[in-house]
Amino acid sequence: MNQSSHFDTKHTRTLDDLRRNICMAQPGEDLVLHETALTAQYGMSRTPIRQILQRLAYERLVETRSGVGTVVVALQEAQRKRDTLTHKGILQAALLQDLPDLSIAQHSDILALGGIASMVGEDDRGLQYDVKSRLHGLLSGLIPDPILQDAFSASYWRMVRWHMHDLAVDATAATGRLRAFIERIAAYEARNSRDLVSRIVEGDSASL
C-alpha cells in the first residue's frame, strides 16, 4: 500500500469512527471535539483532523463555536421536517439519474440487511447504526452524479442521527420502523436500483 492509500484509509476510518460516536451519543449529551486530543488519539496531524471536522460540519453534525471548539450540533425537533424533506428530495433527484444496474454483490448485501434487520433488538444500538451505515454504502454507490452523491451522504447521516435519537427516546417504536423499512426495501421486486430507491422514497418518511 502506498503512502497516499494509507492516508486515505486512515482518514476514512477516523471519519467513520467520529461520525459513529456522534450518532451514538445520547440526546442531550454534550460532546466537544478538541483538535489536539484528536491528533493524539488517532495519530494524525492537525491538517487531516481539520479536514475531517470540516466534513462533519458539512454534514451538519458538528459546528465550531468561538472560545469552545468543535461541538456536536444538538438536534432541534423544529428542524426534523426540513431534514426529512431535504433527504427525500435528494433521493427523488437521484431517480432522475441513469441509475446503474445492481451487481450480484449489491443484491446479496440488500438481502443480507433484510435478514439482519429482522433480528435486531431494541437494545442493539450499535447494530442498528451498522445497518444504517451499510445501507448508506449501498445507496451512495448507486448515485452516478458525484455532487448529488455527496449531498445524499450529508443528508443521510443527519437522518441517521434522528433515528438514533428516536431509538433513545422510544426504542420499541424506532426499532419497529427500522425493521419495517429494511424489510420493505429488501422485498423490491424489479431487482434494480430504480425500484430500490423508489421504495425508499415511497416509504415511511420517519424511517428514511
Image: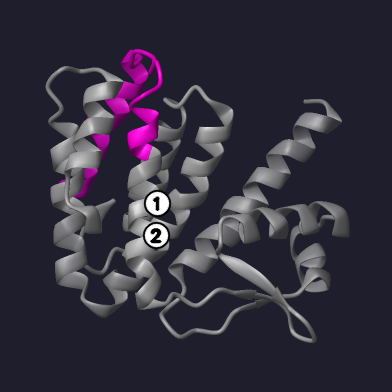
Q: Is label 1 in contact with label 2 (beta carbons under 8 Å)?
A: yes
Residue found at x 33% / y 36%: 92
The front one of 9 and 1 is 9
Residue found at x 35% / y 14%: 103
Q: Which quadrant would residue 168 be assigned to in this image?
A: bottom left
In the picture shown, does residue 199 fall above or below 102? below
Decide if residue 114 is in sight here: no
Q: Is residue 16 left or right of residue 103?
A: right
Residue identifier under label 2: 83
Q: Which quadrant would residue 107 be assigned to in this image?
A: top left
Amino acid at pointer 1: Thr
* Residue 107 lies in the magenta-colored region: yes
Quadrant for the N terminus in the image:
top right
In the picture shown, does residue 85 fall above or below 197? below
Residue found at x 28% / y 71%: 166
Q: Is residue 104 left or right of residue 171?
A: right
Are there few (<14), some (14-19), or many (20+) residues within 10 Å of tag 1?
some
* Magenta-tinted stretch: 91-118
x and y, in percent, of residue 185 in the image: 19, 36
Instruction: Give the main secondary structure, helix, strand or loop, of the magenta stretch.
Output: helix
Residue identifier under label 1: 86
